[in-house]
Amino acid sequence: MKVLIIKTSSLGDIIHTLPALTDAARIYPNIVFDWVVEESFAEIPHWHPKIRKVIPMAWRRWRKNIFSKQTLKEAYVFWQTLREEQYDFIIDAQGLVKSAWLTLFAKGQRCGLDWHSARESLASLWYQKKCTVNFYQHAIIRMRSIFSKILNYPFPEGLPEYGISRQSFMSEPKEDYLVFLHGTTWNTKLWPEVYWIELANLLAKENLKVKLLWGNAEEKARAERIAQQGSNIEVLPRQNLEGSAKVLANAKAIVAVDTGFTHLAAALNVPTVSLYGPTNPLYTGAMGKSQICLASDLPCSPCLKRECTYLGKSAVFPACFVSLAPLAVFRSIQKNPFFLSAIMGE
């Protein structure tokens, strides 16, 4: 069986889809998948053993110069590649009009969510096979449900298996360290800098080092400010996706905000404490046996807002993180058995 997946972005959304491939492969051992994805994330599908071919597209780059010769040339090659194969199923796992439109250019039965389930209802008009999936559930469960209904097998029980081998990214251990994933897209999802510093100081008392990843100038500046306040903190050079995966895979544990790399940590099965203020871990929390999700208990959380509108007094910004202080996070690390075995030597 040959299946084409349309799931172009983002980092977290792509990782959320991987367990569905593992589920399908258990039922259909000979199944293979091709995957249409934005070029910046093209590495990730390759990490799953059931991916045969990745078809990168560059819509984010193409739309800036949509009529240039280079764009037209690259787009033509993309369309030609998309039409090379005859697929048994084409699954739009994005549920958007633009992703549904892409299904029209491939050969095979077009499949996706129905009018009431898709993120953009109009997308359902392009599908030949449609399924109903509850929108208000965790994104991974939603993806696993879509694939089970389209490919006709019972929804599998148990935690997701992402199909990514942590061992393939690991090297000979040189030092014990934790990673702080401090960067994210919304200001309201940022854990306060003073909290990162305080947590690093608590870890220093346990003789544990901290490494900081970053992806842009703003994140680099934040990492450098945090590192200035602790002798056990190292700001790493900028990493590509594979390099970031190696840093995460070799870590003893991770503390993270709600960001795509948090889900990569979960996929690699690295013990992680992830922190949620304005977002809801019931829908997008890191999922796996070594994952701990800590959510704010402020009455207005989760607000799902990019701007904080809290009117009360708060010692920190964003206000919703006042209930997730460093000591509480540190105690979560100490009490969790996965962390105890990984970093406390027990």
Image (cartoon, rainbow, N blue to C red):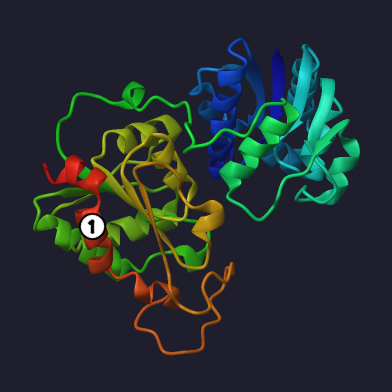
Q: Quadrant of residue 174?
A: top left
Where residue 115 appears, as percent x and y from the top left, is 85, 48
Q: Amino acid at mark 1?
A: Ala
Q: Nearer the viewer, residue 27 or 282?
A: 27
The residue closer to the viewer here, 43 or 331, is 331
Q: Residue at the location (35% across, 69% down)?
A: 192
Residue 159 percent across, percent down from the top left: 47, 38
Disc 1 on helix, strand or loop? helix
Q: Which image quarter is the C terminus in?
A: top left
Side of 285 relative to 116 (left or right): left
Say whether residue 69 is left or right of residue 285: right
Q: In the visual, does 248 lie left or right of 120?
A: left
Above-or-below relation of 159 to 188: above
**Quarter occupied by residue 338:** top left
Which residue sits at x=71%, y=41%?
A: 94
Q: Relative to 116, is 79 above or below?
A: above
Dot 1, how many residues are within 10 Å of its Cα: few (below 14), some (14-19), or many (20+)? many
Q: Is residue 328 left or right of residue 72?
A: left
- Residue 289 at x, y percent in the picture: 37, 41
Give the vertical position of 327 relative to 136 (above or below). Answer: below
Which residue does the numbered mark 1 point to in the structure image?
227
Residue closer to the observer: 309 or 150: 150
Residue 70 appears in the figure = no
Percent position (x, y) of residue 117?
77, 49
